[in-house]
Amino acid sequence: MLLQFIANGLVEGVVLGMFALGFSIIYNSSRVFNFAQGGIFTVAGYIVYLSWKILNLPIGVGIMLAIIGAIGLGMLLERLIFYPLYRQQSSPAIVILSSLGSYLVIVNLIVLILGNETRVLRSGVEETLKLGGGILTKIQVFGGCTALILSVLTIILLRHTRFGITLRALADNSSLIAVLGLGIQRLRLLSFAWGSMLGGVAGVIAAFDVGIDPHVGGSAVLIGAVATILGGIRVIEAAFFGGVIIGITKNLAAGHISARWESAVTFFILLIVLLLRPQGILGKRGRLEEI
């Protein structure tokens, strides 16, 4: 059973890590602790559901529409809400409240239009694959592989392309980027598009795996925030490793204690890490004052 819980945890952790990576890209480029990312996660799941189950479009078209919708919603939020707040030099508290308010507006619009019911994309019993000592569904395997590939590609792009290096430089010193004339406004917009794309893909995978309801993004965005802090809030790539650790921890806690203790164990680990290493597992101690 231990191998089964580890296998489940790895799959969930990789998807959570990809979501946290998108969360971290947005935070480090714009300083927006974007709770609205949970709304984007939810909207992507509903778009693929409506496209495939209601409009009878091919599943590939539904997934593409979901990803495009997630990117568009993320860029819209940046243009209409977060960039005006940035120009007004609003305090971090106002920005956080605005992102939380955006999430609540998105969730309530979904409830108003589509209701509170849980929607299921799969029908019948899903085929399973035996890998090592664990058994996983085909959706878990496909979703985990997709999340892992996208996360690795994102990390490579962040480290080895001009845009990725500029984005990381923006996280370190936004004033220097402005002096060099590299266009903070454009970088912020692209970072929201990138982060929202990763959040949207995570939402689609979750919708196929466990179904969707209007509030499913709430727990995802909380875990994404915890994973970002756990990995190292000023190191963009560290959020992915934080997500993997949380995924494995949640499943081991569910298997050996109770599923009701998943969140408690996750936040207990966060508290221990913050007490012993407040800059995060992969964070740099020299930047502690900036956390």
Image (cartoon, rainbow, N blue to C red):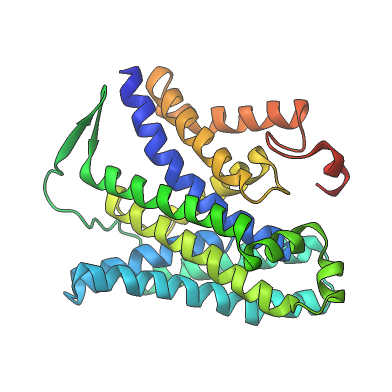
Q: Quadrant of residue 162?
A: bottom right
User: From where the camera sits, is residue 85 visible?
Assistant: yes
Q: Looking at the image, which residue is at 50% across and 69% down?
A: 106
Left or right of 135 on screen, residue 249:
right
Residue 275, placed above or below residue 94? above
Q: Looking at the image, which residue is at 21% across and 44% down?
A: 138
Q: Give the image location of residue 30, x and y in percent.
A: 72, 66
Q: Give the image location of residue 231, x and y in percent.
A: 64, 39
Q: Looking at the image, which residue is at 83% across and 65% down?
A: 91
Q: Give the image location of residue 129, x and y in percent.
A: 18, 35
Residue 73, placed above or below residue 252? below
User: From where the camera sits, is residue 104 visible?
Assistant: no
Q: Give the image location of residue 92, x and y in percent.
A: 79, 61
Q: Looking at the image, which residue is at 25% across and 47% down?
A: 139
Question: Which quarter of the image is occupied by the N terminus?
Answer: top left
Left or right of 235 on screen, residue 207:
left
Left or right of 51 on screen, residue 169:
right
Quick one: 59 or 37, which is closer to the camera? 59
Q: Quadrant of residue 120?
A: bottom left
Q: Furthest residue to the left?
A: 124
- Tally of numbered discs: 0
